[in-house]
Image (cartoon, grey):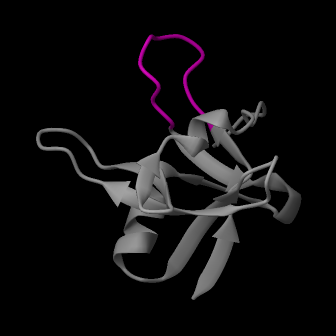
Amino acid sequence: MADAKITCINKPLSGSHEHITHVGNPEVGWIWTVADVVKSIDANQNTFYVLDPSTGKRANVGVIRPSNHAPYLRTYADGNWSDNLLSLPRYMYAIS
């Protein structure tokens, strides 16, 4: 099982809803869809995390499953779920 650091996100340029479509770490060569990350977490194949740029503190990434909506990713640290992923820079290159 790999422990993967997420350093960037991709989301639509327009729209009022904060909907992340991809996450990744281009420095080490990977960009995945949120659906693929959810599958990987569910299958216990990989774990994912982000680091707070000001403190260096780790926040693990987990899957949230709201009723009647697709699963999405959030970070979890110190007993709290948060939206740390939204503070990551956007990956500004074409994603296939």
Residue nearer the viewer, 36 or 19:
19
Residue at 45% x, 30% y: name it: 19
Indicate the quadrant where residue 35 lies: bottom left
In the picture as drawn, the residue positioned furthest to the left comes out as 68
- Above or below: residue 90 compared with residue 25: above
- Above or below: residue 4 compared with residue 63: below
Rendered location of residue 9, percent (x, y): 64, 41
Rendered location of residue 20, percent (x, y): 51, 36
Q: How many marks?
A: 0
Quadrant of the frame with the N terminus: bottom right
Relative side of 64 to 29, left or right = left
Magenta segment range? Answer: 10-20
Relative side of 51 to 32, left or right = right
Residue at 64% x, 78% y: name it: 3
| Magenta stretch secondary structure, dominant | loop
- Above or below: residue 55 compared with residue 89: below
Relative side of 63 to 55, left or right = left
Please say whether residue 69 is one of the residues in the magenta stretch: no
